[in-house]
Image (spheres, rainbow, N blue to C red):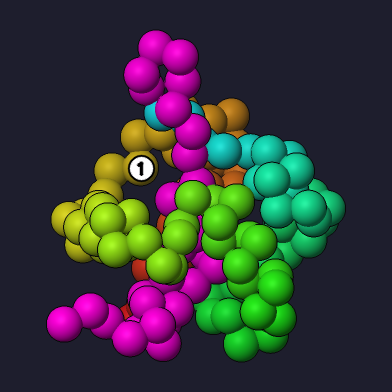
Amino acid sequence: MSAAIWDKLDNFPPIACRLLARVVTPTGGTVAKTAKEIAKDAGMTEMEVSSISWHASWDKLTVDELKRFSLACGVDFTSRDIMRNHSSYLRKSPSFKYLKKSPEWNSVFKPMIVAYVQSRK
């Protein structure tokens, strides 16, 4: 039986979606997707993306914002395969290697991981 959409939303708040946002490089590796790339794909400003990225729930966002942001991050709540892969990755103590390679590791992603872990307690 598949998880209800509400469970999926609870398990993948905006902060988790942002941490999962990555792109495959031409060489087959992965790198963190930038706020600028997410903003372009979502039709949002970088400021909106940066703000949404820190939310621990979808409560204050519209359905339209939820859809545009999550899809731009590569989290498609309607895809069983994508959700299974993301769930598995987060469940297995993720290494976030692609985030550690980012120039924003210390200033953005490391604190974001701490905030995400705290929000799950």
| Residue 7 spot, x, y in % from top left | 35, 84
Q: Which quadrant of the figure contains the N terminus? A: bottom left
Q: Which residues are magenta?
A: 1-29
**Res. 98 image quadrant:** top left
Circle count: 1
**Res. 3 image quadrant:** bottom left
Q: Is residue 116 above or below residue 38?
A: below
Q: Is residue 56 above or below residue 25?
A: below
In the image, taking residue 111 as reference, residue 40 lies left or right, namely right
Q: Is residue 118 visible?
A: no
| Residue 55 spot, x, y in % from top left | 60, 73
In the image, taking residue 83 as reference, residue 76 lies left or right, namely right
**Mark 1: which amino acid?**
Phe
The residue that label 1 is drawn on is 96
In the image, taking residue 83 as reference, residue 33 lies left or right, namely right
Q: Please check the rendered image and state whether residue 11 is part of the magenta-colored stretch, yes or no.
A: yes
Residue in the image at 68% along x and 85% along y: 60
